[in-house]
Amino acid sequence: MLPVDFTAPQSNQTGVTETELTEILPTAQRFALAYAPAAVRADVLTVLALDTRLAGVVRAAREPVLAQLRLAWWREALQDAAAGTIRAEPLLGRLESWREETAALIALVDGWEAMLANDGSGTAGPLAMAEGRGNAFAALARVLQHADCAGEAQRAAIGWSLVDQAGRTRDPDHSAATLALARARVECRPRLPRVMRSLAVLHGLARRAAARRQGDLFGSSGALFAGIRLGIIGR
């Protein structure tokens, strides 16, 4: 009998439904996904679900080495997918139409791996992870035939990500430092097309939270109403 590959993620090899993937998303991402146009919802959900799966690897890590092995599995699997070989993991199967753009998602794996080495004393880890998310959303913009706004999508994702990380750290000094870095990244309002409305919601909520020196996107009164307005009109 062959040994079990403990580096591979455990999942239902027969496939997962969109409802199942949506349920694993954090509250803010699930809220933002609700405003994705039906035609692009599948691709937006795939990016958000991949990000959530990678975050789970890092946050559940008791031994950094094991987490690194699991992240290495994802890195190699994305490399294979970019080359046209899809491994038996339902989430990867959703990337078949991405072709070479799948390679951009490797930066997301690298970013989450940087969080493993983050000791809470600086912002290098959150910034690396934010840049990984930025690359992922830039790739999404290109997949959705909006390469012209890839740079805007990248900047928007970086700003949202830094605020998100500021809200997740338990160290108040580290949270404040990350939030200070975030405020410089979310001041400008990106010009994003309708197909990137979910990202516009996340960035808008992050911009609002950062102005109030908060890391929780729904941490203040009026945040829900602001999120609904962002979802409807994009600003």
Image: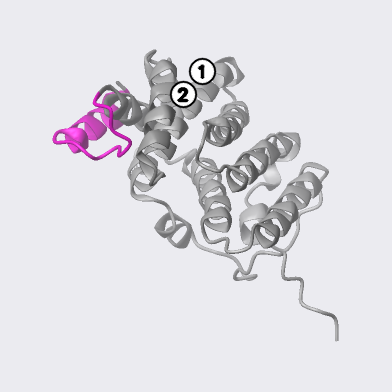
State which quadrant residue 14 falls in. bottom right
Per the model, the C-alpha gap separating discs 1 and 2 is 6 Å
Q: Name, please, the residue furthest toward the right.
A: 1
**What amino acid type is highlighted by mark number 2?**
Ala
Q: Quadrant of residue 64?
A: bottom right
Give the percent coordinates (x, y) of residue 173: 38, 34
Q: Which residue is found at the position 81% from the left and 52% from the top?
A: 85
SS under mark 1: helix
> Does 184 appear above or below 92?
above
**Image: magenta residue range:** 212-234
Asked if residue 28 lies in the magenta stretch, the reply is no
| Residue 152, label in figure | 1
25 or 178, which lies in front? 178
* Callout 2: SS: helix
Q: Could you say which quadrant of the image residue 169 lies in?
A: top left
Q: Residue at x 14, y 36 (%)?
A: 221
Name the image quarter holding the N terminus: bottom right
Q: Nearer the viewer, residue 70 or 35?
A: 70
Q: Nearer the viewer, residue 96 or 101?
A: 101
Residue type, label 1: Glu
Q: Report the number of discs.
A: 2
Asked whether the viewer can see residue 36, the reply is no
Q: Residue furthest left?
A: 221
In the rendered view, does 102 fall on the left or right side of 144? right
Is residue 224 a member of the stretch shown in magenta? yes
Q: Which residue is mark 2?
A: 156
User: Picture coordinates of residue 145 (x, y %)?
Assistant: 59, 25
Whether tag 1 and tag 2 are in contact, CB under 8 A, the answer is yes
Q: Residue at x 34, y 29 (%)?
A: 206
In this view of the protein, which residue sits in the foreground, 141 or 131?
131
Residue 106 in view of the camera: yes
